Image (cartoon, rainbow, N blue to C red):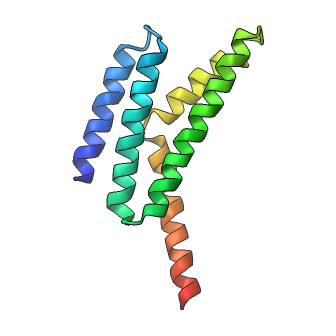
Amino acid sequence: MIAVLTVVMIYFGFKRERNLLVFNTHSVFKFVHIYLILTSAIIHLLFKQKKYTKITAGLFAFYMIICFALIQLGTFGVDYHLSVGLSHYLEDLFLSPFPLMLLIPAFMISKRMQELEKN
């Protein structure tokens, strides 16, 4: 199941890249929600603990707030590279398997630390 979800994530990555030149807010939110669901599902299947799934959802919510704030700064006339450009960079970073590559080892370390504290 994890392999299927990973393949689906890669498929949506290619689909997103194909539509990258056409930027609209609706498609960005659609892909954010797809990646949130896929990433949370993989994390839940691996660790089977709600707290890790909630942390993943919180990370994506934080990402959306930061990107929205950066885009709003761009509408106020702040330099493109500092506002909208940075928002697009964060979008490329989060809408990829990269968060999984960070979260899985972090959660494994956290789980190991909890086991060591119990013993």
Residue furthest bottom as drawn? 119
- In this view, the residue in front, 42 or 18, is 42
User: As drawn, is 46 to the left or to the right of 101?
Assistant: left
| Place of residue 11 in the rendered image (x, y in percent of width and height, measured from the top left) | 28, 30
- Give the residue drawn at x 35%, y 43%: 38
Q: On screen, 48 above or below 87?
A: below
Quadrant in the rendering for residue 113: bottom right
| Place of residue 5 in the rendered image (x, y in percent of width and height, measured from the top left) | 27, 45
User: As drawn, is 117 to the left or to the right of 52?
Assistant: right
Quadrant in the rendering for residue 27: top left
| Place of residue 118 in the rendered image (x, y in percent of width and height, measured from the top left) | 54, 88
- Give the residue drawn at x 40%, y 37%: 35
Q: On screen, 10 above or below 38?
A: above
- In this view, the residue in front, 18 or 44, is 44
- Give the residue drawn at x 40%, y 49%: 40
Res. 94 visible in picture: yes
User: As drawn, is 101 to the left or to the right of 87?
Assistant: left
- Give the residue drawn at x 43%, y 35%: 96
- In this view, the residue in front, 59 or 20, is 59
